[in-house]
């Protein structure tokens, strides 16, 4: 069937309805002998009225409601806990149908990321369970890659977060667990649904995909018509330094990555953001700051500096505030728009992947030695 998404946890699972686009739903309805206009009604119940059961879709016939029930899952994510931090960042843990966990983080305003003070409510969503890229600062990859999230599981993180908070999410970043560009098909389907006015209705310029730098996929994403934003997890300004932090740099060294970024620039209007975690003695030298400034200027990119968040099982440290500030000032002094993220969510394991990892270790889904032993 056209509407079945790929990459779900189990082959015999019903597809999550939140991963079905309007055109896909119309195809399914046609197969069921139902008129196409029912798609608009169903989507209205899902994204407008936010019903919790197909039986609540009262303007549909009983027969169609039963068929929907048989074919689709309305709730593929069970909220199992949320953690609040002192700075109002909230972190949600969701249980998937195969027993795995993903997490999403709600950040009430994100001026450090995007400048202006605003009523922005940014949700940071996951795209995979675990991660295959093994960045040396990140908890997500510590226990390896488990699976891609389906489009429905990506979209539903928004639905559940909005349900819990009774507030609309109006800005979305794909900076949670996983590498979104390694799950491109499901990511694009999710973006279609998230952006559509029959779906979540979040404008393309309020969607940011963050990547460790998969050059070919960056170009594929650039070919998509939507004016979404791109963030690059750079973390090193030379191959020598970046390689120590991110193994992916061996496959796509900086020159190859930047070639893809120039291609992106030809297709998209918004500035690229470089994320740069400051790690003591690893990438925080004056030389790296100078080189980073040069690279950012070449692409008119902005830089978001993030003090390294300590991850259990990893040995690096964050530099002193004085070092952080002087790194920032070198960038600014060379005309690069740059921000230093003052702490958000440090006290709730907000660095990507930490919460899910704790839960899965606790339940024995991943072993502690796999995590600690690397
Ligand atoms: N795979 C994608 C999406 C994951 S987001 C990518 O690489 O971009 C990765 C981001 O999470 C990093 O760029 C950083 O901003 C944040 N992050 C992860 N671990 C961190 C840590 N230990 N300290 C601070 N930030 C961290």
Image (tube, helix red, strand yellow):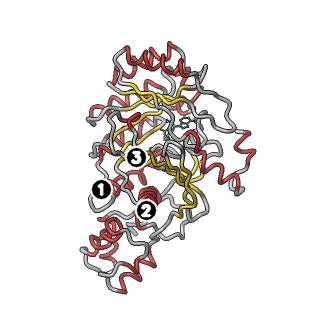
Q: Which residue is mark 1?
A: 201
Secondary-structure class at tag 1 = loop
Q: Quick check: can you spot residue 3?
A: yes
Q: CA distance from mark 2 to mark 3?
A: 15 Å
Check the picture and name the quadrant holding the N terminus. bottom left
Looking at mark 1, is its residue's CB closer than 8 Å to ligand 1? no
Image side of residue 256 versus residue 128, left or right: left
Q: Is residue 155 visible?
A: no
Q: Is residue 291 above or below residue 40?
A: above
Closest to the camera, between mark 1 and mark 2, is 2
Instruction: Classify mark 2 as within 8 Å of ligand 1 or not, answering yes or no.
Output: no
Question: Separation of disc 1 and disc 3 at Cα?
Answer: 14 Å
Mark carried by residue 122: 3
- Please tell me which residue is depicted at 28% across the width and 73% down the height of the picture: 41
Q: Residue at x 75, y 44 (%)?
A: 369
In the image, residue 278 above or below residue 31: above
Which callout, 2 or 3, points at the residue further toward the start of the chain? 3
Quarter assignment of residue 33 = bottom left
């Amino acid at each position: 069937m056209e509407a079945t998404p790929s990459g779900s946890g189990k082959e015999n699972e019903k597809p999550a309805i939140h991963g079905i686009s309007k055109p896909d739903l119309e195809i399914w309805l046609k197969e069921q002998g139902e008129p196409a206009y029912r798609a608009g009604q169903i989507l209205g119940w899902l994204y407008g009225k936010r019903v919790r059961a197909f039986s609540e879709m009262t303007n549909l016939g009983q027969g169609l409601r039963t068929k929907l029930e048989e074919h689709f899952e309305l709730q593929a994510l069970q909220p199992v806990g949320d953690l609040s931090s002192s700075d109002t960042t909230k972190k949600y843990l969701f249980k998937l149908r195969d027993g795995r966990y993903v997490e999403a983080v709600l950040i009430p305003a994100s001026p450090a990321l995007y400048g202006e003070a605003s009523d922005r409510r940014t949700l940071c969503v996951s795209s995979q369970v675990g991660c295959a890229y093994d960045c040396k600062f990140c908890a997500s990859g510590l226990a390896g890659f488990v699976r891609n999230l389906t489009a429905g599981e990506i979209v539903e993180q928004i639905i559940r977060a909005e349900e819990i908070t009774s507030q609309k999410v109006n800005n979305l970043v794909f900076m949670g667990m996983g590498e979104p560009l390694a799950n491109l098909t499901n990511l694009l389907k999710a973006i279609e649904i998230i952006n559509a006015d029959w779906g979540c209705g979040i404008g393309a310029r309020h969607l940011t995909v963050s990547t460790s730098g998969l050059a070919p996929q960056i170009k594929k994403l650039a070919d998509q018509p939507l004016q979404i934003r791109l963030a690059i997890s750079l973390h090193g300004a030379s191959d020598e330094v970046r390689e120590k932090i991110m193994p992916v740099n061996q496959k796509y060294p900086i020159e190859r990555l930047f070639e893809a970024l120039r291609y992106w620039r030809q297709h998209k209007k918004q500035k690229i953001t470089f994320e740069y975690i400051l790690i003591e003695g690893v990438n925080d030298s004056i030389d790296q700051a100078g080189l980073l400034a040069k690279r950012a200027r070449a692409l008119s990119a902005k830089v978001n500096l993030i003090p390294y968040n300590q991850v259990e099982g990893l040995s690096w440290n964050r530099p002193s505030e004085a070092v952080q500030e002087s790194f920032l000032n070198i960038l600014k002094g060379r005309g690069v728009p740059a921000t230093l993220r003052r702490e958000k969510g440090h006290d709730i394991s907000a660095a990507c992947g930490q919460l899910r990892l704790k839960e899965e270790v606790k339940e024995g889904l991943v072993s502690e030695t796999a995590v600690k032993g690397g």
